């Protein structure tokens, strides 16, 4: 046999021809598939190949800094290292390894990280922040032993820092990680920090800047190979506040150990010079991401350290409100300065006796003495003659019971009652007896320390309506944008009425019988008014208040301005449960004015 | 008489330069394309240099083998096959485990993959069985080739090396068909295969390894398993497709350069080539492979004896199965199995086997009939 066998040869030749044909067919099938992939779908695969090796990374913009009015830093950025994970780079076995090592070396609980990863379902390539502000030791660990932490990266970023700690914490506010709502609505990325309160929140848009990006060519392991394209971030604008750091320090020192608030503003412009609320907190706590425990300790604290008492604390104005009633009486022509009422120490009305704070009474008092000595009976009379709605009109003109419009978030409005208000919300008519309570600043009245300071400012600045504000200017690359004062106008008060009131308020401090004598400063003319806000309604026959336990004691008010001839500063002081305004609050106001004027500059 | 004398001289004395030129040239072009692509896939480091050395070793053994008379090979072919089986069995005792399978044998610094050599040994042994078979195969006669293949098939399957096992089976089937088979035998056999497939399929599925199942599922629907086994196919298709018509150019394939391609220097070297050279390159390369097999078959029909004929057809079939399965796999036409692309995939065992096969083709050409 063998191939020499002719018949066999022919057969085998035919078979090999078959083989060649089958092979040709197979090759054509392969070519068809290659044609499909490379020619028909080529564009798609080219796009896909580009897409899987090009990654865009967010580059955060440095946040704008915050300075006081003289350029001293209140909020700055310090370099820090943040630790991220990119879920897309976590291979099959990587996740347990990463979770294990994160809890072992960095103290991040597995549950916490797992929840973080689960929350971010959208883009697997967006870096998720694991830990902010790595310590030196942690940084060395994660850089040198990167195989323990697959899919992670370290990014150097600025960290918000408040060099003075709790100083002006309420005003500056604090930062928090961006929430889901902001992520959906705004141009934020997971892990961004946003202002949550205070100036940080109010001026978030100014401070934030514009984030940049970098487009990298990455390999299958997520390693950056080549920078293809980038856009530099635009840093946020710097902000200068009207705040005076020295004065703020004085204010916070005065409130140490107390609960209360101090607001100081320039009555000519509405610039806030100091704004302190006690107790306070350290906004640096929030930068690293506050733990649930710390948050509970802060938010559940019975003294409410997170509350900014200056704009959120609501209290009856007490006798400070007599300034408004006096102005209303003069403007409405119900009373002339020389008109006298007789104070026997009480005012019988509607079957009960409304007491004056002074047992035995003041005798015959005119308007000036009524303000100087804070005679309640005089204002019961005047209030009764005016009626609630006249009082409301002037209180409203002076900005009480509503938001002042200060450039800070979460301001509260309070309540300045009127007969219409009572009818609408309580469905009851206004009782004349309630007017008497309102005339001495009690009852339904609820105001913030800022509102009282604004009221005083507008009375002593010659009747100019002002808007309190904390922003002095925004600085962007050397260009300054100062605060624009809008809506500055004259209030419809007679000039000599205001002059009279200023004089009377000076008397309250300077006269021998003045209730605010504790605010006197040698060489400076100071005007002021005491106030006492009732915490619980007193029955008329109850004893005097000093003996009450502190929680039931009244809040002490004092508002003051100086110098009387040309006021440069107006202060409102509130000491919770401090008792009498004259003794508990007036010395604080004195120290504020002294600290501000004795330095001799004031400002512009 | 004189003619007969002359013919005898040519058979006895071998001229060194008497080469099947089209076949050798095709082989050479593919080798060069392979080396360039490997350089691109590995960055020209250790792999490339080692492959270069293997190429020289392979070329040398090819020429050496081409001088051999296949009559001698025919005589010892059963021993060669037995030796290959022993090597295959040794893998289980001292083999190296990589990617969940035992395929490698360490001989000093050299790692040998006996399953590659086994394919060639099977061809040598099977050819002799075919020569001794009188006339077409009937169902009764099929026991001989079946017994021959079975040990190699079982050994490779249990490594497990599904790809090689299937190639052994397909190779034997092709050769038996070339020898010839009665129509009724063929139909009965097909029916038998079908029945075994339907009844035994679930059984075999139950005995597959996890990664094998995933690969088959990924083949059926790569997008759904994109994060898993389908990842390889999808990335490979992306590499090939993104080459478009003209390719991205030498060292410009982002899929390969950035490690998105798995096993880019071994099983998926074709994807690297297709990404860099585009459809035009693919047409040329597949054309070269086609002609490699085509010219080998042309040598076969000039063979002096039936044994040489079957050996050369066997070698051609090995080439064809490898490149069709490998390319089909990288393009998603076939499930991912570990089958190298001849002359292009990195790896000494596959390369030497390919060259030895080429040596057999050349030896047959030297002793061809007019």
Image: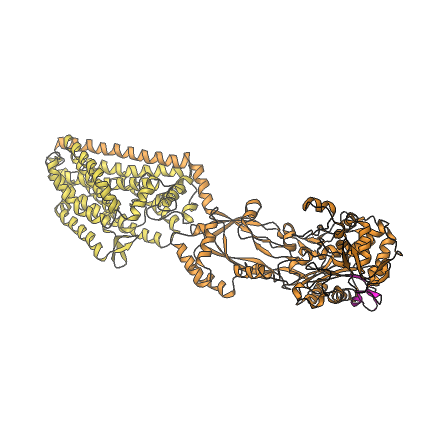
Chain colours: A orange, B yellow
> Which residue appears farthest toward the front when viewing the image?
A351
Among the 4 quarters of the image, the one containing residue A377: bottom right
Give whichever of B221, A572 is nearer the camera.
A572
Residue B244: percent from the left, percent from the top? 42, 38
Residue B25: percent from the left, percent from the top? 30, 41
The residue positioned 84% from the left and 49% from the top of the image is: A332
Q: Is residue B224 above or below residue A502?
A: above
Residue B205: percent from the left, percent from the top? 25, 44
Q: Is residue B286 above or below residue A319?
A: above
Among the 4 quarters of the image, the one containing residue A599: bottom right
Q: Is residue A370 shown left or right of residue A234?
A: right
Q: In this orientation, does residue A270 appear?
A: no
Residue A243: percent from the left, percent from the top? 71, 59
Q: In this orientation, does residue A3 appear?
A: yes
Give whichever of A209, A327 is nearer the camera.
A327
Quadrant where the C terminus of chain A sits is bottom right
| Magenta span contains residue B74 | no
Give whichever of B254, A249 is nearer the camera.
A249
Quadrant where the N terminus of chain A sits is top left
Among the 4 quarters of the image, the one containing residue A26: top left
Q: Is residue B302 shown left or right of residue A490?
A: left
Q: Is residue A11 shown left or right of residue A185?
A: left
Q: Is residue A253 above or below residue A47?
A: below
* Number of marks: 0
Give whichever of B157, B113 is nearer the camera.
B157
Q: Which residues are magenta?
A: A509-530
> Which residue appears farthest toward the right when viewing the image?
A338
| Magenta span contains residue A528 | yes
């Amino acid at each position: 046999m063998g191939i020499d066998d002719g018949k066999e040869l022919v057969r085998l030749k035919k078979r090999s021809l078959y083989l060649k044909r089958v092979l040709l067919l197979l090759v054509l099938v392969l070519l068809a598939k290659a044609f499909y992939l490379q020619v028909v779908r080529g564009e798609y695969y080219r796009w896909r190949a580009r897409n899987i090796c090009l990654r865009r990374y967010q580059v955060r913009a440095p946040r704008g800094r915050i300075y006081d009015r003289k350029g001293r830093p209140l909020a700055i950025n310090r370099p820090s290292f943040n630790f991220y994970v990119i879920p897309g780079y976590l291979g099959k076995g990587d996740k347990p390894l990463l979770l294990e090592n994160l809890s072992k070396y960095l103290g991040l609980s597995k549950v916490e990280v797992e929840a973080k990863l689960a929350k971010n379902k959208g883009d697997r390539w967006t870096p998720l922040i694991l830990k902010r502000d790595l310590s030196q030791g942690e940084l060395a660990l994660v850089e040198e032993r990167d195989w323990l932490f697959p899919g992670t990266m370290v990014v150097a970023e600025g960290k918000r820092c408040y060099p003075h700690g709790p100083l002006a914490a309420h005003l500056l506010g604090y930062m928090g990680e961006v929430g889901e709502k902001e992520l959906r609505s705004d141009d934020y990325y997971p892990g961004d920090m946003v202002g949550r309160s205070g100036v940080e929140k109010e001026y978030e848009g100014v401070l934030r800047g514009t984030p940049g990006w970098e487009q990298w060519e990455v390999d299958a392991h997520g390693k950056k190979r080549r920078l293809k394209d980038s856009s530099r971030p635009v840093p946020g604008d710097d902000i200068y506040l009207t705040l005076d750091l020295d004065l703020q320090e004085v204010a916070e020192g005065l409130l140490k150990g107390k609960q209360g608030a101090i607001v100081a503003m320039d009555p000519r412009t509405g610039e806030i010079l100091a704004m302190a609320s006690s107790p306070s907190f350290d906004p640096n706590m929030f930068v690293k991401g506050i733990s649930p425990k710390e948050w509970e300790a802060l938010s559940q604290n019975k003294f409410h350290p997170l509350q900014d008492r200056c704009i959120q604390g609501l209290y009856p104005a007490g006798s400070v409100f007599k300034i408004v009633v006096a102005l209303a009486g003069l403007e409405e022509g119900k009373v002339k300065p020389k008109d006298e009422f007789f104070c026997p120490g009480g005012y019988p009305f509607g079957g009960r006796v409304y007491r004056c704070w002074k047992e035995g009474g003041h005798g015959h008092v005119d308007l000036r003495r009524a303000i100087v000595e804070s005679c309640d009976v005089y204002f019961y009379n005047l209030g009764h003659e005016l009626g609630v709605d006249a009082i409301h009109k002037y209180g409203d003109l002076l900005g009480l019971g509503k938001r002042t419009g200060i450039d800070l978030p979460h301001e509260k409005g309070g309540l300045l009652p009127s007969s219409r208000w009572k009818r609408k919300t309580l469905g009851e008519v206004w009782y004349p007896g309630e007017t008497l309570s309102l005339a001495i600043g009690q009852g339904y009245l609820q105001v913030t320390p800022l509102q009282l300071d604004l009221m005083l400012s507008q009375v002593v600045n010659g009747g100019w309506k002002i808007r309190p504000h904390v922003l002095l200017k925004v600085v962007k690359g050397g260009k300054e944008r100062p605060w624009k004062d809008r809506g500055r106008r004259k209030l419809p008060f007679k000039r000599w009425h205001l002059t009279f009131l200023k004089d009377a308020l000076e008397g309250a401090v300077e006269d021998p019988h003045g209730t605010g004598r504790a605010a006197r400063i040698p060489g400076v003319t100071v005007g002021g008014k005491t106030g006492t806000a009732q915490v619980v309604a007193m029955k008329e026959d109850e004893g005097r208040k000093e003996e009450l336990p502190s929680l039931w004691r009244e809040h002490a008010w004092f508002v003051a301005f100086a110098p009387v001839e040309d006021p440069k500063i107006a202060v409102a002081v509130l000491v919770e449960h401090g008792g009498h305004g004259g003794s508990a609050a007036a010395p604080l106001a004195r120290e504020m004015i002294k600290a501000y004027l004795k330095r001799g500059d004031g400002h512009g | 008489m004189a003619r007969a004398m002359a013919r005898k001289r040519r058979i006895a004395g071998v001229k060194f330069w008497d080469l099947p030129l089209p076949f050798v040239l095709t082989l050479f072009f593919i080798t060069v394309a392979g080396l360039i692509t490997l350089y691109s896939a590995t960055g020209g480091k250790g792999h490339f240099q080692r492959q270069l050395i293997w190429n020289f070793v392979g070329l040398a053994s090819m020429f050496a083998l081409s001088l051999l008379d296949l009559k001698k090979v025919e005589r010892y072919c059963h021993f060669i096959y037995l030796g290959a089986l022993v090597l295959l069995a040794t893998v289980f005792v001292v083999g190296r485990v990589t990617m969940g399978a035992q395929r490698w044998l360490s001989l000093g610094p050299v790692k040998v993959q006996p399953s590659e050599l086994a394919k060639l040994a099977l061809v040598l042994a099977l050819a002799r069985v075919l020569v001794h078979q009188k006339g077409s195969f009937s169902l009764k006669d099929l026991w001989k080739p079946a017994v021959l293949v079975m040990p190699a098939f079982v050994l490779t399957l249990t490594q497990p090396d599904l790809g090689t096992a299937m190639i052994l089976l397909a190779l034997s089937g092709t050769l038996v068909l070339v020898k010839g088979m009665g129509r009724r035998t063929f139909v009965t056999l097909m029916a038998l295969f079908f029945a075994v497939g339907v009844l035994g399929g679930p059984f075999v599925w139950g005995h597959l390894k996890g990664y094998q199942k995933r690969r088959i599922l990924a083949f059926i629907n790569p997008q759904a398993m994109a994060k898993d086994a389908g990842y390889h196919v999808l990335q490979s298709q992306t590499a090939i497709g993104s080459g478009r018509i003209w390719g991205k150019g030498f060292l410009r394939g982002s899929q390969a350069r950035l490690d998105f391609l798995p096993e880019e220097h071994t099983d998926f070297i074709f994807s690297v080539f297709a990404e860099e050279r585009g459809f035009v390159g693919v047409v040329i390369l597949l054309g070269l492979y086609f002609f490699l097999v085509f010219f080998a078959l042309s040598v076969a029909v000039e063979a002096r004896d039936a044994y040489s004929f079957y050996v050369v057809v066997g070698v051609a079939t090995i080439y064809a199965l490898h490149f069709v399965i490998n390319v089909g796999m990288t393009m998603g036409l076939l499930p991912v199995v570990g089958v190298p692309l001849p002359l292009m995939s990195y790896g000494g065992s596959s390369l030497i086997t390919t060259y030895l096969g080429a040596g057999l083709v050349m030896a047959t050409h030297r002793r061809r009939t007019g």
